[in-house]
Image (tube, helix red, strand yellow):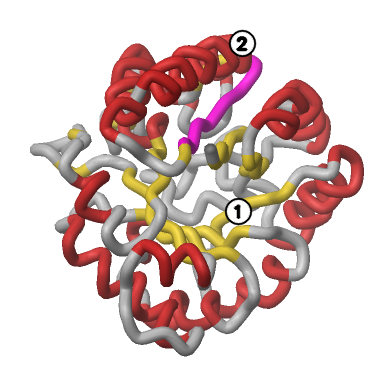
Amino acid sequence: MILITGPCVIESRDQIMRIAESLSYANEKYEFYFKASYDKANRTSLDSFRGPGLDEGLKILEEVKNTFGYKLLTDIHETIQVKPVSEVVDVLQIPAFLCRQTDLLVEAAKTDKIVNIKKGQFMNPEDMKYSVLKVLKTRGCNEANYENSKKHNVWLTERGTTFGYGNLVVDMRSFPIMRKFAPVIFDVTHSVQMPGGAGGKSTGKREFVAPLAKAAAAIGVDGYFFETHYDPNNALSDGPNMLKLDDLKSLLGDINKIRNNV
């Protein structure tokens, strides 16, 4: 099982190293990728915390890799970020709002890194085929199917669909639909987010993380994405939908039981 986890954003070096040290068990048991963003470029408000920026953020992520031996995942927002980020991380993540951004997808595809495309909150899961194809065609493959995407290192990630104002819903049909085109990761913690629901910032309902994750385990996904923190209530980004580190370990045990039964 693929497991992507870590805090939403790099708040400080000490915060990142503390969380990374707490996740050593995950690296032993799963195909594990440590995740943290150096820049949250799509915050609701201009006043929201964004992170340390590209240079300092990559320096901290590289220290995580050198200290713990973890594989790394982080977001890219512009084509000029692809080269420096790809020199440090193992997975280039295309944010949901940019999942149709052709130049960004093509530039990421020119590297030898895994490209994880998050499904836009506005997207029909069937149409994610075309985002996958942008990467595959750049890598010399003209058909979007599960095996081709696995071979050429392309993933899709479900993170909820816009439902009215300030709320998301997870359509469980999206997992088998998108799995026709690529391995699928379920970003559970972002799926319980309530965008812009807290007066200039997003909020969320972490109590729904566990039931959604268990439901996806029964349906079938290739991996999970959980943002986690030792003190999510005081995190500088996405706190209301992040899991506490201890709760994550317990939930992974429940998910494994369901996957084994299925």
Judge by depth and name the residue closer to the eye, 41 or 150. 150
In the image: residue 105, left or right of residue 92: left
Residue farthest front in this picture = 261
Q: Which mark is residue 2?
A: none
Residue under numbered circle 1: 74
**Does 126 lie within the magenta span?**
no
In the image: residue 121, left or right of residue 148: left
Q: Residue at x 37, y 65 (%)?
A: 98
The answer to whether 54 is drawn above or below residue 245 in the figure is below
Q: Which residue is drawn at 20% across and 53% down?
A: 177
SS category of the residue bearing label 1: strand
Q: Which residue is drawn at 89% across and 48% down?
A: 66
Magenta stretch secondary structure, dominant: strand
Residue under numbered circle 2: 246
Callout 2 amino acid: Asp
Magenta region: 224-230
In x, y percent, where is residue 187? 41, 39
Question: Contact (CB < 8 A) between labels 1 and 2?
Answer: no
Q: Quadrant of residue 198?
A: top left
**Does 226 lie within the magenta span?**
yes
In x, y percent, where is residue 209? 37, 21
Query: Could you tell me if residue 221 is visible in this image?
Result: yes
Mark with earlier residue (1, 2): 1
